[in-house]
Amino acid sequence: MSTRYEFDNEAIADFCNNNDVTITFTPDQLDNLGMKGKTTLSIEQISDVANQLYPEENDLRNFIMERSGEFHPISFSLYVQNDALWEIMKRKSERADKMLPMTTIPWFYWEKEAVGKKNPAGVRSMSFPRDPLIVEFEDDALVIKGRGGDFYGFLEGRLVDKRHGIRPLVIPGGSGTKNEVPNYKTEYIQVKIRRNCAQSILYPYPIDELDYAFSEHPRAFYNHGIQIDCEGVNVNLKAGGRRETSLRGKTTILIGKNIKETEDTDKTIMFHVWLVALQKAFFL
């Protein structure tokens, strides 16, 4: 398997020089570099780079934990599928057959002013959140922390305020839409995933059952991300002041980064090393 993304020749050279590592290219990759100036990299090549940089498992884990903040912003979306949540999804005005995320980093929220032809769902996001996503290892669990959005069901649009959550008082006859919209409240999120109870996929395809409107675009995960699948009983979620609870149902976690081609640097390659290292250290 190879990356979906093609890395620039200059970025690859800078990465190898700055980190004192070697990447041995295949004939096809050399042809691509010569003709297009860029190429994909195989997972084996990236894994070999991770081994060159961090041959010991403890070093690999430290790299994952220490560098997670440096790649800020990293996006995270957690989806849960069970009968109760599917029943709630029936209240959606569109795409009732697709599941919204339960938590995301960063925070995605509805805003009246955002509604338009190019954005019918009226979604805004905290494009560059203040707090970075943090990844830690705790006994047999992978822990993901950061400030994001927590799903609080559906409310009339006029009741949803992106800065203060639900307004405590609504004046009768007040302005604003009475149509129900997804209500996401900004909270500090912590997710624990038990080891050996999950499977991972690098560069995942979009999942048909999922609604990505209030999430990072699936293209980001497809090009620069990882998908983690597990049963909810093996995942604990704590949002804000709520107590930590286990989830119920099929759980899908997506971690990735939205990188534009104009931003392609050696740091992009290091992020892919981070993704492969995460898979090696925890899921293999």
Image (cartoon, rainbow, N blue to C red):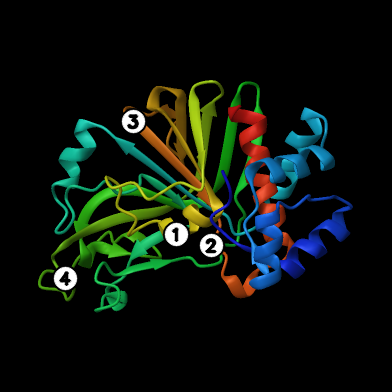
Q: Are marks 2 and 3 in contact (CB under 8 Å)?
A: no
Q: Is residue 194 visible?
A: yes
Query: In which quadrant is the N terminus drawn?
Result: top right
Task: Read off the residue under disc 2.
Answer: 258
In the image, what residue type sits under mark 2? Asn
Distance of label 2 from label 4 (alpha carbons): 32 Å
Per the image, label 3 sits on a secondary structure element best described as: strand
Indicate which disc residue 250 carries. 3
Asked whether residue 70 appears in the rendered view, the answer is: no
Q: For mark 1, what is the residue? A: 219
Q: Residues within 10 Å of mark 2 (few under 14, many from 20)?
A: some
Dot 4 or dot 3, earlier in sequence: 4
Q: Position of residue 281 (x, y in %)?
A: 67, 31
Q: Is residue 54 left or right of residue 134?
A: right
Question: Disc 2 or 3, which lies upstream in sequence?
Answer: 3
The numbered dot on residue 177 is 4
Circle 2: element type: loop
Report if the CB atoms under discs 4 and 1 are less than 8 Å apart. Answer: no
Q: CA distance from mark 2 to mark 3?
A: 25 Å
- Please tell me whether residue 277 is drawn above or below residue 185 in the rendered image: above
- Choose top left, top right, bottom left or bottom right for residue 171: bottom left
* Position in image of residue 220 (x %, y %): 49, 58
Of circles 4 and 1, the one toward us is: 1
| Residue, far left | 173
- Which of discs 4 and 3 lies nearer the camera? The answer is 3
